[in-house]
Each structure stands twice: as C-alpha cells, then as structure tokens.
Amino acid sequence: MANFSKSNVPQFSVDVYQNEYLPEGGREVNAIVTVSATGGGTVGSAVGAPHLYAAGQSPDAAVAIMVDCSGSMDYPPTKMRGAREATAAAIDTLRDGVRFAVIGGTHVAKEVYPGNGRLAVADAATRGQAKEALRRLSAGGGTAIGTWLRLADRLLSSAEVSIRHGILLTDGRNEHESPQDLKAALDSCAGRFTCDARGVGTDWEVKEVTGIASALLGTADIVADPAALSADFTQMMETAMGKEVADVALRLWTPVGTEIKFVKQVAPTVEELTDRRTEAGPRAGDYPTGSWGDESRDYHVCVEVPSAGVGQEMLAARVSLVVPQGDGGVHNLGAQGLVKAVWTDDMVASTRINSQVAHYTGQAELAQVIQQGLDLRKSGDVDGATAKLGRAVQLASASGNADTAKLLAKVVDVVDAAAGTVRLKARVEEADEMTLETRSTKTVRVKK
Amino acid sequence: MSQMPQPTALSRCPSCEEPLEAGDRFCGACGYDLSAVPAPPQDHPTIAMNGSSTRPSEAAASLDWPLAPEPASSDTPAPVHRATDIRGTDSGGSELPHPDTESTAAQQPGDHPAGVQPSGAQPSGGQPSGAQPSGGQPSGVRFDRPPEPDEYPLAPPAGAPAEPVVDPRTADLGAPVTPPAGTKLCVACRSGHVDSDGYCENCGHAQPRERDHMEQELGAVAAVSDRGLRHHRNEDAFAISSTALPDGSPAVVAIVCDGVSSATRPDEASLAASRAAGEALLAALPLGTHPQQAMHEAILAASEAVNSLAEAPPAHEEHAPHQNAPACTLVGAVVTPALLIVGWVGDSRAYWVPVDRSSPPARLTEDDSWAAQMVAAGLMSEAQAYADERAHAITGWLGADAYELEPHTASFKPDRPGVVVVCTDGLWNYAEAAEEMAEVVPLDAAERPLHSAQVLVGHALDGGGHDNVTVAVVPFPAPPQGAGSA
C-alpha cells in the first residue's frame, strides 16, 4: 500500500527564457516562464510547500465523478454502457483513503454513491459498493451541468482535504439551464476544486466543455468513441492521484509604470490567464494555476515597461509561486524568476527573438487560427476558413506539432504544408472537426 | 578591523553613485546637493543592525576593501577614519552642532581632516578594489547633518578610530531606526528601496554595480574603468601592480582587457584574463624572466584562464540560443627603468606619449582587427577601414573558440620619459591616432597618472561613451623603488 506520509511535496523551480535586450525606445518585454515541479516524495529536500499527507493519515484528496445521465445517453446505448464502465475504471484507479463520490447528472444532480451528502473513503469495500451503484444509473432527463458542479462542490468541500478534483462527462448541450446559470456555477466553483471535462459522442458543444475545463483549471477532451472512455478515465484519475500541491498561483510583481499585456499558459495547452488576476499587494498579482503533481508548464508573460535610455537595465517582472493559506496569508514556494529589460543600441542583440518566445507565440497563434478557421467554416466563409486553416497547417508543420497537424489533415487537404496551401475537405467527419477544435490549444515544446 | 581604512565619507554620490571629486559640493552627474547629505551609512557601526535592509551585506562587503596602505610620507595622517571624523561646516563655514564630537578626539577641530590625503601623497600599495577612487578622497565636502535624527539615526562610533571597531551587528542594538538604517533608495526613481537582487522594488531599475566604475592607483601606475553611457554593464577589466626585478629595479605592470560582447559572460572573461596575466607577470618578473618573455607567457596564462571559463558552469544562466565561449581582448605593458614591453591580443591598444610633447607620440600595438588587416593588406585606407561597420570585428582574442592564439609582444627602449596609455577601444575610438591621443593626455600625466586616466575616461564619455572605457596610465621609466612596491 502506498504510504503518502509527509514530504511528498515537489520542488518547484522557475526558469525564464527571454531576450532581455530592447532597442532604444523599446517597451515590450516577452518571456517564457517554465515552472517545473519535480521530486515529489524526496524526503527532506522540499522547498517548503505545505505538506499534504501528515504521517499516519490517508491521502489528502477528494474526487467527484459527474456522469451525464440525460436521455440522450441511451442513443446509442453504448454511451451509457461506456460511461458506466469508464466510471468503474476510474473508481478502480482511486488510491486507498481518497474520498470520493459519484454524481449522476440530468437537469438535476443526483448523488449516486455514497449518498446523503457524504463522501466515501476509497477501499476495496467502498469501491465494490460504488460499482454496484453504477448499475442503477439509467438515462433519462435533461442536462443542467451547473447543478452537477454545485453538488460536486458541496460534497468536495465537506472533506478537510487539500486536493479537490472533479471529473465531468457529458454527451449533450447544456440545454436545461441558461448559459448564465452555468457561468454562475463555474464562478462559484472556480478555485474551490479543479475539474477535467470530457465530451462523449459528437452532440455536445465544444466551447461548453472547454469552458468548464478552463474555468476549473482542468483538461478538456473529446471521446468520440464510448469504448475509449475507460482508458481516458483511468488516465485522468491517475493524473488526479498524482497531484500533490493545490491552489498554486503564479505571482507576478511588476514595477511602477509597467502594464501587463498578457499572461497565458502556453504548455501543455494554451490557457489565457490575463483576466484571472487577483491583486496581491502593491504591484503584485496572482494568476491561478490549479494543482500540481510532478509536471512542468510554460507561461508566456508579456509586459510593457516605461522606455529607458540605452545602457539602462531594469527588472520588468518578478515571477514567484505562492499557495494561499487558510489564514489569508500565502506560502511562498521559494522559486522565483526575473524578467529583465536591458536597452541596447546593438541591433543584433535587440532584434533577436528568443526561440522559446517565438515558438510559443506560434503555438498560441496556431490555436487561434484553428478556432477562427473552424468558426469561418461553420459560417460558410470558405475563403476565410481556407486562409486560416492554411496558416494553421503551416504553423503546425513548422513547429513540429505533429498531433495537431494530423488533426488538421482530417479537415483540410494539405497541398503544401510549408507554404500553408490547403483546400477544405468537402466532407469532414463531425468527430474529426470537434477533435480538432477541442485539441486546438494543445501545444508542443520547443524542439531540442 | 581598525587597520582597514574605510572609504571616506562620500566617495560616491549618495543619489546616483557617481564617484565624487575632492571638494565637490554638488554631484557632477546628477547635481545632488552634497551639503544636504548626512554621512553615508556604510561607515557607521549601527547600520547593520537592521536585518531587513540590504545594507548589512554592503557593510560586510566593505570588509574586503583593501588593506591599509602604508603612509607614503610621514606627513600623511593615518588613513584610518570614518565619515564622522570629517568635520562638517555649515554654509557659513562655522562648525556644525555635532553629536559625535567626543568620538573624534583624535583630531583637533582645526586639524587637517583625517580622511583627506593630500593629492600628492598616494598610498603605495593596495589590492584591486571596486569603485574606490583612492586618490580622490573627498576633502572639504560639506555635509550638514540635519539636527533631527530621521535620516540616518546613528549612534556615536564605538571608539576612537585607532581602536578596534565593534562588530556592527552587535553594536548598540538600542539605537532608533526610523526609517530602517541602511535603506538604500533607488538611484532612478528616488522613492523605491533596493531589493536583494539589486533592483528597485518600486520602478524595477537596476542599481549601479561595483564594476560600473572602477579606479585604482598604485604608486606610479593608475587605471580607471567605466561602463560608459550606452552599455548596461562594464565588460572591461584591468589589473595593475608593481614588483621588483632580481636586480632590485622596479617593474610596473598594467593589464587591460575588453570582454567580447557577442560572447557569453564577457565580463567574467575580461576579469579572469586581467587577473591571470597580472599574476603571471608578478610571478615571473622577480625571477628574472625577460619581461618580453614574461609578457608572452602572461598572455598564454590569461588565455588559459579564459578558456577554462568555457568549461565552468555559468555563474548565472543566460539562455542565449547560441552560447559562444567567453572571450576577451588583452593589452598589457611592463615598464622597467630601461625597458617598455607591450603585449596584446585583439584590438585593445597601447600608446606612447612622451613627456616632452615636441617629440612624436606613437601607437605601440597593431590591432587584430578587420580594419587593421584591410589596411595592412593595402585594400583600404585607414580612414576608409575604420569608417566601415566591420572595423571592430576582431580577428584575434582570448577564449576557447579562438582559432589560433598569437600573442603579440614588442619591446621598446624609449630614450626619453613619457607615459604608456593602455586602453580599450572605448577610449581610442575617440582618439584613434597617436597624435589625437597625445592631445588628450594631460601634460602632467607622468606625475598624476590617476588624474590622467580619469581625464581620458572623461574624454571618451564626453565623446558619447558608446562602449565601456578602460585606461591604464603607466609612466616611463618606472620610478625608483619606494614609490611603487606592491
């Protein structure tokens, strides 16, 4: 049995990649900030993250699985069966001691297991009971995802744990509540738990599912074939079980007179964070990043600094990582990176674009042109869609984003990838288009 | 620690860190009114008490300042002093109400202030130091201490200057600290404090670094290095020293290095090269190695030192996409009573400027540069070559990626006294021809090498200061022993 006592906390490190040289009068500073958490479980060398597993206590996590039980899940019936099997597989992946609950979602949310507003503690017996309860899942009713999330929040918050995570599966549009209701539910849940969202089949709305995952700092994906759900749920749950520190925020300090143009996560997926800043004292703000296991993510920070004379050097931003504490204070994870600006009249230095910045600027544009291209395609603008998706093919090919290139090739006929010359396919499988849209934000790292 | 001479009060402008001249009333760079400045905190034992400021590390760093120079002449007062030892006067010349009067009993009010060394009497030895103008101790600086203690509340010094100074961290913990003593204000915005990384916590601006401006005078030789006006750091370095040949005659050494900006860590390269070459010469010359041979070997030693930087892990990570091995140029001079030896790699230069200006000056080195090669090959005139943007592309340097190291050395037997100006292109860009250089070298350069080096750096800064500027001024012949022994 796994023993997750104390020091299973990763070391965080921050690396900054940038060209700090600006030409005379230059103001925009771009940097890629790589945050890595490594060595969870390394005894005695923790940087000082709040430890999650006190000695002798069970793992400090709670998970809620939300399964769509709306009427459409029976068309075809393989969806309901797939969802049941996937949920069972996810339950089998739970570590002993993790609190969990299963929620059946329709136009209302129902507790499927254990019920009575409680969470079960995972062990052989509860896992068996939960799987037994899954058999009672039947399709019928509408879809109001906001209610599922609110119930998950209520259940998850009943446990004194650090990591709270949800897994949400839907097959249809959120038809039985207004978009405002869903938005309100997401706002109230944001920061309280993280949530991965999956769409099964092809009748769901990509922007709804990606929006949920984005708001709750989880992943979004399509599972077009219900048979593939089990593997995906197992993998999602394994990732959730690997999380060791929750609620990590990227803290950005910037000097007087600077303006933060944007902050976005750029790897593993593109995630806009600019508007999710919460102020954290003078000239500092926190951007949520959710929970972390052993992993590495990249962020693109762009700040505009006041212009200074050639030969001047200034700090454009200081990046650190913090974890909010119960008492309103924060725990600083120790790692920090400096984003600098140095003005030079050396044109060679100031015009060089950092390869990381260039790469992720391209990846962000890739995600954007795919979205735009698919939107234009839906609205019938063939020329516009061709141009955008052609650019996407070009970017994917140049940056070595092979997965996205493959997805694009199912939507367009590639004539010349390097030049970005493509033709829209006359017939495109709906699943292929939705897969491309859902995964458009996936990025690859710089080729070494 | 009383044997360590603390720098006098106000060796640098408290606002912009510009080194001050003796007698300045206003900072020459930013116009800061020096009369309004209380004693700088680093000389006061109470400073390090506040752990929340950056001052403690500065105070600690001050312990690494050069050992006490022996007084060069008997009329030089003991160099041990603190800022409070210098008597301030108000604008009318009368004495200020001074809380520390009793602590300065060693000096009578009418005495020459201890911190003021007559400019002719220079310390005869010393270690390379940071930005500490050893010749330009401020004298007659007026600084009124405000009667209310809200600027730098200071306890009286722990004792007379000759007595051991109490460890600042343990001294008088009861002194009031409002605002925190040692709080260093940003030189750019004047309102933010400086954080431990050396950036302003308000406007983010980098603070001046130790290497931004360095001055050193050692007996007969002096050197000044400055960041210039357009570069963000000083990538030049110098090393000056003096020693004795086996026959007892003096030998003066000056090494100047210019880091290659397009390589990584050029500042580390120049520092390593200048130190290695200087040390190699100091080791070889007293053993009787011929100075020219010693110079050749010193360049090889410097090359080794720079090469080894390429293997060492970087002191600070730079994520340049292409990392060139650290590299720098080198020019050095050895002056003995009869001989003048120069050695170089790259485009840093040595010039000969005779004391008697009626005889011609000369450039002693031949650049390893594109322009020099063009001229040597007869493909371009000197004017054309140096007007070309490739003029400064160097064809020889110290560094792991140098194609083939060819140390150049030359030996001269000047028949008249003069000075050798050893400099980086940051200076000679503004005085390329030997005649132009002679124009800017002060007539009393042999007597006042530090002053001359300052003037030459000033010439480059006035011209635009587009590069780091480093100049060493070495009089020939080497003066007899006594004036310059390391």
Image (tube, coloured by chain):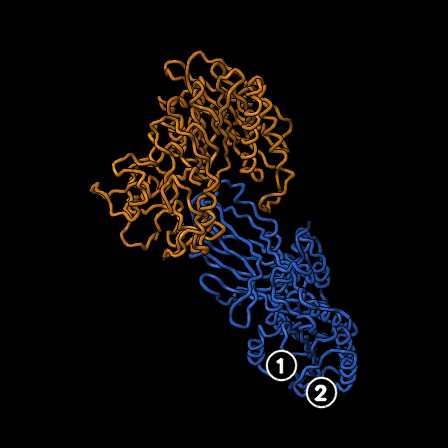
Chain colours: A blue, B orange
In the displayed structure image, the side of residue B418 where residue A55 appears, left or right: right
Q: Amino acid at mark 2?
A: Gly
Q: Nearer the viewer, residue A134 or A178?
A: A134
C-alpha separation, residue under disc 2 versus residue under disc 1: 29 Å
Query: Picture quarter containing residue B224?
Result: top left
In the displayed structure image, the side of residue A403 where residue B410 appears, left or right: left
- Residue lying at the far top in this picture: please name it: B415
Residue named by callout 2: A140
- At mark 2, the secondary structure is loop
Local crowd size for mark 1, using a 10 Å CA cut-off: few (<14), some (14–19), many (≥20): few
Q: Nearer the viewer, residue A17 or B387?
A: A17
- The residue positioned 50% from the left and 25% from the top of the image is B385
**Quadrant into which the N terminus of chain B falls:** top left
Residue named by callout 1: A158
Q: Position of residue A291 (x, y in %)?
A: 63, 67
Q: Amino acid at mark 1?
A: Ser
- At mark 1, the secondary structure is loop
Query: Picture quarter containing residue B50?
Result: bottom left
Labels 2 and 1 touching (C-beta < 8 A): no
Q: Determine whether B451 is above or below A62 in the image.
A: above
Task: State which mark lies toward you, 2 or 1.
Answer: 1
Q: Determine whether B256 is above or below A325 in the image.
A: above
Q: Position of residue B419 (x, y in %)?
A: 42, 20
- Residues at discs 2 and 1 both on one chain: yes
For mark 1, name the chain. A
Q: Position of residue A97 (x, y in %)?
A: 72, 76
